[in-house]
Amino acid sequence: MRILGIESSSLVASTAIYEDGITMAEYTVDFKMTHSQTLLPMIDEMVKLVGIDLNTIDAIAVSGGPGSFTGLRIGSATAKGLALALNKQIVSVPTVDALAYNLWGCEDQVCPLMDARRQQAYTGLYTFSDGQMQTLLPQCAAGIDEITAKINESGKKTVFLGDGVPVFADYLKENLQVPYLFAPAHCNKQRAACVAVLGGILYRQGKAEDAAAHKPDYLRLSQAERERQEKARDFRI
């Protein structure tokens, strides 16, 4: 089974081709360029380097959210366009799950943190046992105080990763009551290989969808939508 993975939920742009236990190619850029500039050229470069025809993939796995609204839309549009052109299905992979999968096999509790602004994070809690990732807290939008309290309540040593770590590091250092670590640079951000591998698992479980049905899972309203609701509420008052 051959899966094309696409990750664009943050500043990281990443693409990968995964086949039967092998990451054939992965191209990741963490730089301030728009994903509309990077994703398709990266996919094209990978295909040329490994010498495959995109028609031979079985499905397209895409980071389905949460994350940057613009980034998710670009990733979703890229996946949908390719899926329609190639007549393939899309597998929507939860972003926080895929981020946690970076630390596959970690014996400690894993807590991804993506900066969601306003002292909130897109986060979840995970552990690994018997070669499987176990979800202790499904991905959600939560205040950093809420997730910190939940980790303290668990009493478990925790490893943090994601672009929210530098944002919330000081708060965590001051308020955590359990042992903790911050993941190193080579495995602390989103990777399309993780999206592709999880996408393959979900694909085998029959959790693929047609391109027309796919849409990102933002978990919360965009800032513009929140501001519009606030203005409407103020007007009614």
Image (cartoon, rainbow, N blue to C red):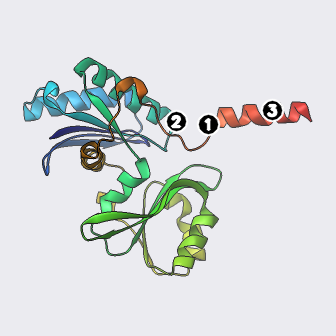
SS of the residue under disc 3: helix
* Residue 189 seen in the current view: no
Sequence order check: which comes first, mark 1 or mark 2?
2
Q: CA distance from mark 3 to mark 1?
A: 14 Å
Q: Quadrant of the C terminus?
A: top right
To which residue does mark 2 refer?
A: 69
Answer yes or no: do the residues labelled 1 and 2 have beta carbons within 8 Å? yes
- Residue 19 spot, x, y in % from top left: 14, 44
**Foreground residue, 208 or 120?**
208
Q: For the residue marked with disc 2, what is the amino acid?
A: Phe
Residue appearing at x 89%, y 32% in the figure = 236
Residue appearing at x 28%, y 46% in the figure = 205
Q: CA distance from mark 2 to mark 3?
A: 21 Å
- Residue 161 spot, x, y in % from top left: 41, 61
To which residue does mark 1 refer?
A: 222
Residue appearing at x 66%, y 32% in the figure = 224
* Residue 155 seen in the current view: yes
**Foreground residue, 212 or 106?**
212
Q: Which mark is residue 231?
A: 3
Q: Is residue 121 left or right of residue 83?
A: right
Q: Quadrant of residue 29?
A: top left
Answer yes or no: do the residues labelled 2 and 3 have beta carbons within 8 Å? no
Q: Is residue 70 left or right of residue 236?
A: left
- Which residue lies most toward the top here? 85
Q: For the residue marked with disc 3, what is the amino acid?
A: Lys
Q: CA distance from mark 1 to mark 2?
A: 7 Å
SS of the residue under disc 2: helix
Q: For the residue marked with disc 1, what is the amino acid?
A: Ser
Q: Which mark is residue 147?
A: none
- Residue 169 spot, x, y in % from top left: 52, 66
- Which residue lies most toward the front here? 206
Residue appearing at x 18%, y 30% in the figure = 45
